[in-house]
Image (spheres, rainbow, N blue to C red):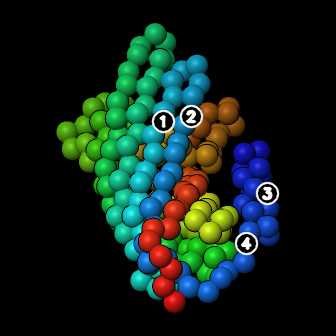
Amino acid sequence: MKTIALLFFVVGIYFFGYSQQNGYYKSEIGAELYAGFSNLGGAFGGEIKYAYLVDKNLAVGPSFRLQRTWTNNLGINNSFNIYGGGAFAHYRLQEKLFLGAEIQLFKSPFNFISFQPILKPWALVALVGGGAHLKLHERIRLSAGIFYDIVNAENSPFRSSYNFKIKDQTGQTVRYLPIIYRVTFFFPLGEKVN
């Protein structure tokens, strides 16, 4: 149901977005916030991106993410931080759509395969995907997309955010599909260039 709601949201913004104007900004700051809570725990955090626009369609730059996660399962409390950085590239099509790739390295103290602390707590994540990139205002852009992790589906720090699960006949989850949603607001810096 969340997938359908997100799809309608993105399509609605796509059709009601502002049209493209002449000129573009050479750099932007991107901000993404994340929060999810339940009676068994939760997580909150965000990511900051700096986008350098090579031309009006291609944005590249570094990113940094910090996420705080906690659990309260059967009376056992646990909390940890996930943090790290990386680089991204987005190709924007007429301020309506984008295709993107992101590679990031995160420190994650939890191994989802064995549910034990791991000796090498750094996890590589490589995401490919795309979605809507819209101009909401002269100084606000929105990128809302779906990304697939092509490297680290089994031990990803984003595993708790995977929204697609494969279940067996008894209803037990047997596999997670490494697909996540990303909603990032970009704020142009400086003055427009032609």
Dot 1 corresponds to which residue?
44
Q: Which mark is residue 8?
A: 3
Number of the label disc, if any, that sits on residue 14:
none
Residue 18: give its label.
4
Separation (CA) of disc 4 from disc 1: 31 Å
Front residue of this view, candidates 66 and 24: 24
Q: Residue at x 64, y 41 (%)?
A: 167
Query: Which is nearer the N-term, disc 2 or disc 1?
Result: 2
Where is residue 119 shown, x and y percent of the image? 20, 39
Whether residue 113 is visible here, answered yes or no, is no
Q: Which element carries disc 2, helix, strand or loop?
A: strand
Give the mark, 4 or 2, whose residue is nearer the N terminus. Answer: 4
Residue count near mark 1 (Cα–Cα under 10 Å), binned few <14, some 14–19, many ≥20? some
The crowd level at tag 3 (other Cα within 10 Å; few <14, some 14-19, many 20+) is few
From the image, tell me which residue sits under label 2: 36
Which residue of the protein is positioned furthest toward the top in this rendering?
75
Tell me which numbered mark, 4 or 1, is placed earlier along the sequence: 4
| Res 21 quadrant in image | bottom right
Q: CA distance from mark 4 to mark 2?
A: 31 Å
| Mark 3 → mark 1, Cα distance in angstroms | 25 Å
Query: Is disc 2 in contact with disc 1, using a CB cutoff of under 8 Å?
Result: yes
User: In this figure, what is the number of numbered marks?
Assistant: 4
